[in-house]
Amino acid sequence: MAQKAAKQQAARNTAILKRIHLFSLLVNALFLLLRSLLFRSSSTRATFILWILLSIPGFAIEFWFEKIGRPASGAIGEVKNSGQDLEAKGLTEYMFDVLYWSWGTTILASLFGDRAWWMWAAIPLYSVWLAYSTFGSVRQGMAGLSGQGVEGETPNGATSNRQRKLEKKGGQKVQYR
């Protein structure tokens, strides 16, 4: 019973890794098939060089997920290491976003040609927006901790029932620093 959570985590990670590898194989095989057979006249050497160069980040992320998420089992089937949670928020979630975007770009490039590779420019823009929004929310949280809010109000703008009743009776008004 003690390793139930570890076994569940290992099963989830194994399923996620299997899905990632299968979809990556499918997307890249689709690119090679479409560009080599169907759209052969518009495929150049640069097409395949772009595909290799712009697929490297996706392959690196896939390798990283394999390294940190693959569960390790013992000889008799017990879970030695369940791997890190591949459904975690934060950096893992961002890396999945980049992976999905790279797959989408590869699919569009296989269908519409080399101009679709320009969609890769959205990843650095997304990174800048994500960093700005994260920094902005941290800054607002720090401002609330240091007492830089509106005077006379609680940090979240609401007062408790007890405080309202005391103020209604004419009792002391609660002030916050």
Image (cartoon, rainbow, N blue to C red):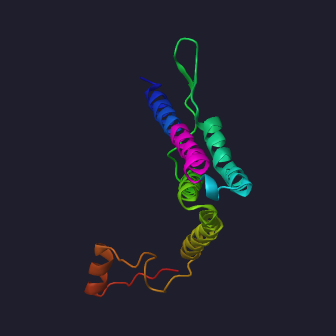
**Residue sitting farthest toward the top:** 76
- Looking at the picture, tell me which residue is in the foreground, 125 or 59: 59
**Residue 159 lies in magenta, yes or no?**
no
How far from the left and from the top, in percent, is residue 133? 57, 71
> Does 136 sit left or right of 157 as displayed?
right
Q: Is residue 29 in the magenta section?
A: yes
Quadrant in which residue 91 is drawn: bottom right
**Magenta span: chief secondary structure:** helix
Q: Examine the rendered structure and indicate whether residue 167 appears above or below residue 57.
A: below
The percent coordinates of residue 5 (x first, y second) are: 45, 31
Q: Residue at x 62, y 66 (%)?
A: 115
Above or below 111: residue 131:
below
Q: Residue at point 52% right, 82% down?
A: 149
**Residue at point 58%, 17% (across, down):** 74
Q: Name above or below for residue 174 compared with residue 125.
A: below
Q: Position of residue 64 (x, y in %)?
A: 65, 42
User: Does residue 22 appear in this view?
Assistant: yes
Q: Nearer the viewer, residue 49 or 41?
A: 41
Q: Position of residue 29 (x, y in %)?
A: 57, 42
Is 57 in front, or is 141?
57
Q: Residue at x 57, y 39 (%)?
A: 84
Q: Is residue 85 visible?
A: no
Image mark count = 0
Q: Nearer the viewer, residue 11 or 134?
A: 11
Where on the picture, by quarter, is residue 162?
bottom left
Looking at the figure, which quarter contains the N terminus? top left
Q: Which residues are magenta?
A: 20-39
Spot the residue most to the front.
Answer: 41
